[in-house]
Image (cartoon, grey):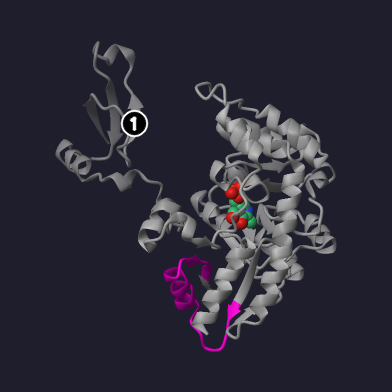
Amino acid sequence: MGVIDICNISSSCLTNYSIIEGHSNKVDRNRRRIIAMTSSVNVERMDETKRRLSGDSFIRPHLRKLSPYQPILPFEVLSTRLGRKPEDIVKLDANENPYGPPPEVLEALGSMKFPYIYPDPESRRLRAALAVDSGLESDYILAGCGADELIDLIMRCVLDPGDKILDCPPTFTMYEFDAAVNGAQVIKVPRNPDFSLDVESISRAVEKEKPKCIFLTSPNNPDGSIINDEDLLKILDLPVLVVLDEAYIEFSENESRMKWVKKYDNMIVLRTFSKRAGLAGLRVGYGAFPLSIIEYLWRAKQPYNVSVAAEIAACAALENPTYLKNVKNALVQERERLYKLLTEVPFLKPFPSHSNFILCEVIGGRDAKKLKEDLAKMGVMIRHYNNKELKGFVRVSVGKPEQTDTLMDCFGRLS
Ligand SMILES: Cc1ncc(COP(=O)(O)O)c(C=O)c1O
């Protein structure tokens, strides 16, 4: 076994070498000395290894295989690409709330006093307001930079590399993406053809694969179906952490199940301001957690995860529940009108939805991707699916009545 003296090395990036910090009596005044022990490797070979190190050699192996998440194009980029002003684009591809937040939000942001001070790491004002809004004490609530951050935070707290999560596609793809980032395996139990959960197969998969957690979405993105109490209770009875994502719950006739976390120690409920309050751009989400879990999320989260602007905006939005309710009613009413109109389009088969979007199968030999592209050329953006679970489907977000009219006009021109 050889011993190499290495001086002035600031980081221990020499993989395959076991490195021991030099004893203080061996360290020159301004030089850091490391003694590395290795088997018959000479200095020349080590220099070559150093030279060959490229940036990606520092990246964790499982991340080198990760396919990048495909985010939507920023509005300005889209506008340039389509050669249309942003206000002339009918954006129905990301389930955003076209009404935006209540006027109080812009007023509050305009009079923001302390943008130069770090935000409250505990988002106390927002959590107090959420306690009133949800009827669940603030001790059970943690806010985040969107529900997206909380999905990742939960995984970072729960999963060791190699652990498994259970996913029920088709569903929100961030669960699978975050699992890959966190080095977890994804066990998939596809939904039934009507998009309900296959509870029997879920039970069997939990027993056999022993996943640490299961991600459930109600209403589910992309089809808008909801999970009934009977199915949810059966899944809560399994030895698995159940993360129930209620990003779209306001658009259903169901109440949020946030309060259930007081009864079920294996349940987390996630919600967001992106849809209900038109604040997708400001990034505020929140979750309800059992007390036995939340304390670890507090320890692991980034201290300033909710910005001053995000907290101010979310609090201001909650101050106008009438606006939030009116916007929700307008979107639910428009969803029903849109659904009826979509049933009249000869090449679409829409699915009933409890959310602010409608999934449609593209039928009659039409190509779903081409349909999406043809609409984009006319300035109307919708989402297209072409994966194992959803081939030849599109999803249309519910917009304002005039946006529905434009969409239907475009479908008419493509008929
Ligand atoms: C099911 C679901 N959960 C969570 C999110 C993300 O919410 P947020 O904007 O709060 O990160 C989305 C966004 O589209 C979603 O569809």
Residue span colored magenta: 361-384
Which residue occupies the foreground of this view, 246 or 87?
87
Q: Which residue is drawn at 29% across and 31% down?
A: 36
Is 198 within the magenta?
A: no
How far from the left and from the top, in percent, is residue 52? 21, 46
Which residue occupies the foreground of this view, 56 or 35?
56
Is 368 within the magenta?
A: yes
Q: Which residue is drawn at 23% across and 24% down?
A: 8
Q: What element carries label 1?
A: strand
How far from the left and from the top, in percent, is residue 368? 50, 78
**Residue 401, placed above or below residue 258:** below
Relative placement, left or right, of 179 versus 211 is: left
How far from the left and from the top, in percent, is residue 228? 81, 63
Which residue, given by chain and number where applicable, does mark 1 sit on? 19
Instruction: Answer with the quarter of the image where residue 289 lies.
Output: top right
Q: Is the residue indicated by label 1 positioned so its CB lies within 8 Å of ligand 1? A: no
**Residue 261, placed above or below residue 370:** above
Q: Can residue 286 be seen in this view?
A: yes
In the picture, the quarter occupied by the N terminus is top left
Which residue occupies the foreground of this view, 291 or 194?
194
Relative placement, left or right, of 164 versus 52 is: right
